[in-house]
Amino acid sequence: MGFTAIFVPNFMVQAAERAEPALRARALALIEGAPPLWSVAAVNEAARKAGIETGMTKSQVEQFRGIEIRQRLRGQEKAAHAALLDLGWSISPRVEDVAPDAIVIDIAGLGSLFGTEQDIAREMEKRARGLGLTAQIAAAETIDVAILAARGFAGVTVIPAGEEAKRIGCLPVGVLSPPEEILEIFDRWGIYTCEALAALPVAQLSERLGQEGVRLHELARGESVRSLALAEPEIHFEEEMELEDAVEELEPLSFLLGRLLDQLCARLAARALAVCTVRVRFELDTEDSDRASGVKAPDKKPAFMDLKVRPPKNRNRIYERLLSLPVPVRDSKMLLSLLRLHLQSDPPTAPILKIVLAAEPARPRVSQGELYLPSSPDPEKLELTVARLANLVGDAHVGSAELVDTHRPGEFRMRRFVPPGDRASFGTDEPRKLRPTRTGFRVFRTAVPANVELREGCPVRVGFRGMRGEVVTASGPWRSSGDWWREDFWHNDEWDLEIRFDGADASRREEFPNGGVRPSVQHGVYRIFYDSVRQGWFVRGMYD
Amino acid sequence: MARDLAALRFEVESALARRVTAPFQYRDRKIVETVSAGIPEIDSLAGGLPRGGLTEICGPPCSGRTSLLVSALASRMADAEVCALIDGRDTFDPYSAEAAGVELKQLLWVRCGNIEQSLRATDLLLQGGGFGMVALDLSDIPAETVRYVQLNVWFRFRRAVEDTRTIFVVVEQEPNAKTCASLVLRMGMRGADWLRTVEISGARVFSYPHTNLFDGAAIQAEMVRARGQGAEAEFYARAGLAGMTGLATETQRHRGRDLKFQI
């Protein structure tokens, strides 16, 4: 066997049901067109049984009870078609993109991986279900026979070599996808099946229908042979959803994002890939006319929406954010949690009309833990924890410090925390030697103003934060200055001072009722500086 | 006699069946793994910092708490462990920490503004797990504020690290965790040492301040609670000049004498 075709029947409806799985259990009618001239483009089986037909107007459909009406969305069909291609590439690299609802896969050489043609077809059916699609699968020696059989027969079909004409003979000529006028001619001639068409003499057929007739005749006989037109594997993964009613609250938005992320992750998993970056794009509803016409304002402003910004009317704005991950992940729930945290800290400024999620793929992380290396936080869990911490204290206050090559006192920058992942990152295999114990230092990030009494240019009494004390030993002044070409240049005279605070008694330890001891600030070593720019004394920090 | 003992045992076990399982079964005391705090004197005093336990380091300002904290962090990082620091009032100095051996890229630093953020961040990090050491620095938050943290918070923190390899250290002005703490150390500075290039005494000291250089401090640690061999220990923390300048490689400014450093 050479080829297997996958066909998704009633593709438009399946694309809509893939985006909203709850619709599978209900009667569904898809409408298209410009309002108010909506008409039914496709229906599912339950709606057909209820009497809904394609071509009906929306108002006619609304006469029926229990029918779910949805607008046909090209974005959903595009995503479903992409999922179908991903399914094909998950089986074999040789895939032809036949139509939005059909693909053909070259299965030569896959026997050792999957087994017989029947096994391969069953595997495809199972993977299609995992991607939210119900597919008809057919395997045959030639491409066109496989496509025709997939279109014509439900479930899984395997056509052995030599039985092509016999098996597809019972199919209606419509599966050959002839032009409309030729189909009418066949209907007038009484040719309804492929077998009947195959029985016609080809010479006379070509006289009346031309080359198209010959081609259709060849297809009906199952003798059409051609090469596979390979499709290039897509590296773009995108899912989108258009909303009929704009979403304002975070909870329903999270529900929709979760569904889109599930679909994205399933497609990536089918291609053995993971998410490296997620781009979120919202089209916002900024039209004010509906609101001004008397729509009741909500009693309570939605928790995460700031509606103070009123952009010009009739112009949808775009909200776009990028979520970068330290390691590629496939866990849709974890991605949803990260997205929620980002949205809570940086919410869109208007209700959302359309959601587009695009994922940049990467190979999944493959790491082999070392036996003697201490465990470190799980990268995926850590990313979530860091996102929650950033939500709590701000993005700029979580991470690891990186010293800056400058003389400016205390200059550093915060960078994203990424724990070293392997022993090489920690340095050599030899355990690092501990350095001699160093005196710790605490920085007062906003330098504390101080009152300083000088004698012969040296501080002798210092007061700050309600404490006053006498300088026991002073070291300084150590002058530093820099960045004179910038507006924030500095010029400081620094001192290290040992201060004994007023009222300190080394022998006294005051006890608290709970058993604790009141910490008495007896004396300490502080670093203060005179800022020549601000013309004042400040305390930079203390040695602790 | 044996029959009476058996009957008595059965009676006691039946009475306690709903509350205590196997009341007569001998249970070995759980062995707690300890690791070095980076300071030999502290290790011999307290036996090291316990894994899966809560350690409190208490003391007033300028008592050596930060010196012990960064030494402990450096010790864990020397063993290739990843650590986290919840900085209650954003007073951590990366320069002096790096000079003490802390690998900044192995340290997750959470810079908080108040005690609520600090406690919430601690919850998140302890629940996340995987860190060799998690340090909560509340030393710059007023002691009366920390005193109002309820005991069940400390109990929750202790339970979060129990049965894990994470060392949870709390730095504060006074001990608050009570029985939730496996180890409590009270710190104090006995005295500061200064290098003097010129011997001067009396009032003339202030005429030559540029001849002095802060050399370090003698720190005293008292073990208030835990297993260990002693009650008090003293160690010396040497002052470093890292933190006063950046990463430039140059001849250091005169600090009483010619000193050349390559930082």
Image: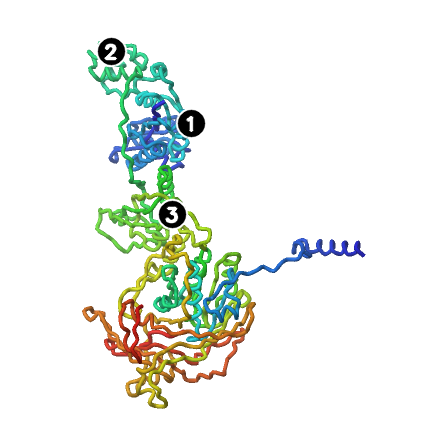
> Could you tell me which chain the residue with mark 2 belongs to?
A
Instruction: Using the rendered image of the protein, determine whether residue B77 is visible from the camera's viewpoint.
Output: no
SS state under label 1? loop
Q: Residues within 10 Å of mark 3 (few under 14, many from 20)?
A: some
Badge 3 vs badge 1, beta-carbon distance below 8 Å: no
Q: Answer with mark 2 or mark 3, whichever residue precedes in sequence.
A: 2
Query: Which circle's residue, 3 or 1, is located before the other in the chain?
Result: 1
Residue at (32, 77) in percent of width and height: A528
Residue marked by disc 1? A115
Q: Earlier in the sequence, mark 1 or mark 2?
A: 1
Q: Is residue A76 above or below residue B162?
A: above
Q: Which quarter of the rendering shows the N terminus of chain A?
A: top left
The numbered disc on residue A336 is 3
Q: Few, some or many C-alpha atoms within 10 Å of disc 2 (few <14, some 14-19, many ≥20)?
A: some
Give the image location of residue A20, x and y in percent: 37, 38
Residue that label 2 marks: A202
